[in-house]
Amino acid sequence: MEVAPGEHLPHDRPDGDASWLAYGDVLTEQGDVRGELIRMEWRHARSRPADREALRRDVDALVAEHRHRWDAELPDGVTAVTRRYGFATKVAVDWSDDAPALIERALRERFVTALCIAPAAQDDEDYEDWEGELDEDGEPAPPPLVAAGALAGLDLSRLVELDLSYLRIGGPGAEALAASLATGRIRTLDLRYCAMDDAGLAALAASPALGGLRRLHLQRNALTARGMRSLHRFERLVELDLRYNEIGEEGVDALLAAPFIGSVERLLLYRSDVSDAGAKKLALDSRIPATLRSYWRSV
């Protein structure tokens, strides 16, 4: 559906009731049932507990009736992961030669601010267990890295959440991604199992688009103590997942010196990632929150 001249979208205040209710009136005038859905959700959120179950059934029935048509608004190959008032807010695309064009089209949708780029179907497993060609030692070779040039050409500037988990971008891909995020506002970045090294992390840390990053997932990459120093650029982190990386005691020292260490709420690591000496430092250092120190005293 085209946006009518003068139509005001509640982008700047996505949680503001007044802007959404006003937008709902515009939708109703255009014959879009999502205008009624906004009103129904608003009533449900403010109803008495005794009335909520019936109102929720009405909302769910309306969504079930129209979901297929709303899904059809997205390009083929783009899947809605989450919706708000019937509008896709997070979408998923499988990586392929056509993925950049699909992503460009998907990000034209008015409320999409979160994106998951998933591995191609044949690569959709932990790459260590991927059954593909054999390497020179006769071991299963991991899937090839995603072409960095294709990532660099993406315009991801409107996103607040990006999920590339299990997509093998490697160091070059991380550098290309940093370029594509040059004017972005990402708050959540998921790079689990991406075959990324310290140089790739350094490139991401240097991106001004990630200065406001709050949640960063880096489970099972090729990161070391050297990469931990790059994390100092992410001053506002509240959640950091570094499991299955070779951090060591030196890496713990770098983490404890990070500007976010006093306010981080979740720091996911295993003792084997940081060594016994590193675990002891995490258990005793007063710079990290007491709840995290208590956890490390118990492992």
Image (cartoon, rainbow, N blue to C red):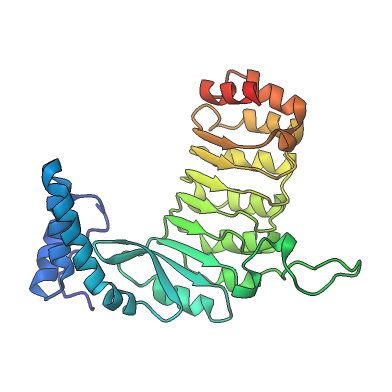
Q: Residue furthest right?
A: 137
In this view, 216 is above or below 277: below
For this view, does 142 lie left or right of residue 80? right
Instruction: Please identify the quadrant where the N terminus is shown.
Output: bottom left
**The C terminus - image quarter:** top right
Task: Give the image quarter of residue 46.
Answer: top left
Is residue 157 at least partly visible in the picture? Answer: no
Q: Position of residue 103 (x, y in %)?
A: 46, 73
Question: Where's residue 273, x and y in %?
Answer: 72, 38
Instruction: Tell me where residue 85 appears, x and y as whole percent.
Output: 24, 62
Q: What's the residue at 68%, 50% (across, down)?
A: 220
Of residues 274 and 129, which is closer to you in this image? 129
| Residue in the image at 67% along x and 39% along y | 229
Q: Residue at x 81, y 67 (%)?
A: 140
In the image, 72: left or right of 15? right
Q: Is residue 80 visible?
A: yes
Left or right of 30, for residue 234: right
The quadrant in which residue 271 appears is: top right
Q: Is residue 204 above or below residue 131?
A: above
Tell me which residue sits at (14%, 58%) in the image: 40
